Amino acid sequence: MPTYTAPTRDTRFIVNEVLDLASYNKLPGFESATADMIDTVINEAGKFCSEVIAPLNQVGDKEGCTRHADGSVTTPTGFKAAFDQYRESGWGTIAQPEEFGGQGMPHVLGFVVEEFVGTANQAFAMYSGLTGGAVAAILAKASPELQEKYLHKMIANEWLGTMNLTEPHCGTDLGMIRTKAEPQADGSYAITGTKIFISAGEHDLTENIIHLVLAKTPGAPDSSKGISLFIVPKVMVNDDGSLGARNSLQCGSIEEKMGIHGNSTCVMNYDGATGFMVGEENKGLAAMFVMMNAARLGVGIQGYAQAEVAYQNAVAYALDRRQGRALSGPAEPKAQADPIFVHADVRRMLMDAKAYVEGMRALALWGALQVDLTHKAGTDEEKAKADQIISLLTPVIKGYGTDKGFDIAVNMQQVFGGHGYIQEWGMEQFVRDSRIAMIYEGTNGVQAMDLCGRKLAQNGGAAIQTFFATVDAEIAAAKENEALAPFASQLEKALGEQKAATMWFMQNAMKNPDHLGAGAHHYMHIMGIVSLGLMWLRMATVAHTKLAEGTDDKAFYEAKIATAMYYGDRFLPDTGALRRKLETGSDSMMALGAEAFQTAA
């Protein structure tokens, strides 16, 4: 049976030493994030997730959810009791606004909790996972009356939220949606239509579910410019906050999925259900993007979360399983065989996983800090810079993070050999569960096009220039340190590849937009590799400083430096090959007609 231990030591290192979160304590919302409070949140969240949520992961996978004749859904054994503990402990309120009952702490700590819960049990995490995004959309766009009516209970996790976009005939192209919203005399709307792939669309964890639904009002433009957003509660809420009658919506079925069986992914049918408009008519897509951006960062966390738990179990197996002898000579001559950990190919997979997971965790938490600074930094200039960085990084964290996270999960399954294919070891579940992260909240191809088609050119390229300037400055500083200079030079070369790829797009994509589409995936990976390289430069810098000052945790910091060197040797060179692929353009890719792809009888 697989196990999970929350990586609290590594998380404390990133939050306290690399990000130095306590140094922001003069900013609003950071006052309570003292060093002691930070450590308490990290340690206690890690303990809760390791001991309470992780043991339910295989239970949820095997049992799945049960839909009953009345459309209600029962979650797997133990999920409700665990969620009650989650809610009562306030884990979902960490980074939520105090005015509606949240704890008002930095998003960095909210991301920490999100990682630990998702690593312990991804299907369980998805029940509360979209609530934060729904809250963000309601905060940004809804009227004060709607905020007061719904946010207190949602932030307390007494009610959970969903996001209803996709329909049977359309996914990413939301302008094609058919769900209708008919205005009513009392100012509400009657919502009618079918939505699919709705995570946590129906369940027994809370007494109410607040659906955020995209729909079109009569006469709205038949495009994305005609979309409005609505709050559609499962159970109507009276003016005094009590629950009233059941709304006219129902779970029609639960999707039969490859993984995340413990989450109820529903087909939702709305039959004249009462809804309330969020924001302006025909401006729903902008409101939904508030929620989607939060969700995309959350999915990026899922990418490295599943890689983390797969990595932990692969390390334990590699240290225990004995097969063959080390090529350099028997590592344990008295034993019949050596642990497979000594074999270079096994070590390659484990080192890839360690370098990716720890680097990606640092990138996600740095991204969370930018979310905080976008709203709370001391100057408008600092706020604008943080907004540029997180806008640019969001598709990278989601796209590159989940592409690579899935690859790592597969390689960790490979470490187990034949046992990795057997259910009881749990590795095949990590692979199945991690696969969805590359697909939902915008497929990774969409993320790559968002990065290259929108974010690079936005505001005259201000965001990418800010990113380049940030990396350039840190490389220059590191090259002054003899110990860091070799890695800094490797990162400088990789950054040069990204700059060259960016310039190639500028020179060629306007002439032929397919060139952009053909190279977007490669560019996203180039930027992901460079971004993790920046994180490893920062981590190595801190580690060198700690070792120079003297520390009781010498092995930890030495491991950071060794892993950074591995990342420089084995990850950063890939940027050159990816740039060369990108610069071949789209000609050979688009040369064949559709008939050439069809198999002849």
Image: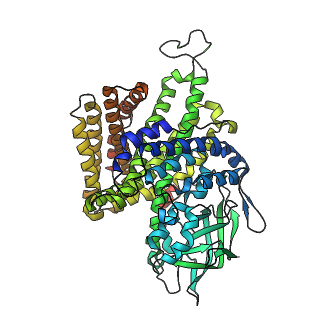
Q: Quadrant of the C terminus?
A: bottom right
Q: Nearer the viewer, residue 540 or 243?
A: 243
- Residue 382, quarter of the rendered image: bottom left
Q: Nearer the viewer, residue 383 or 64?
A: 383
Q: Is residue 24 left or right of residue 420?
A: left
Figure check: 141 above or below 540: below
- Residue 234, quarter of the rendered image: bottom right
Looking at this view, name the residue that lies furthest to the right: 69
Image coords of residue 536 (percent x, y):
36, 38
Q: Is residue 138 visible?
A: yes
Q: Please tell me which residue is depicted at 43% across the width and 29% down the height of the picture.
A: 556
Figure check: 4 above or below 389: above
Q: Nearer the viewer, residue 90 or 556?
A: 90
Figure check: 257 above or below 178: above
Looking at this view, name the residue that lies furthest to the bottom: 185
Image coords of residue 126 (percent x, y):
59, 55
Image coords of residue 176 (percent x, y):
51, 74
**According to the image, what is the colour scheme of the structure?**
rainbow
Q: Please tell me which residue is depicted at 40% across the width and 46% down the height of the picture.
A: 363
Q: Please tell me which residue is depicted at 57% across the width and 80% down the height of the picture.
A: 180
Q: How many marks?
A: 0
Q: Please tell me which residue is depicted at 65% across the width and 54% down the height of the picture.
A: 83
Q: Is residue 530 left or right of residue 323?
A: left
Q: Quadrant of the N terminus?
A: top right
Image coords of residue 574 (percent x, y):
36, 39
Q: Is residue 162 visible?
A: no
Q: Nearer the viewer, residue 448 or 515?
A: 448
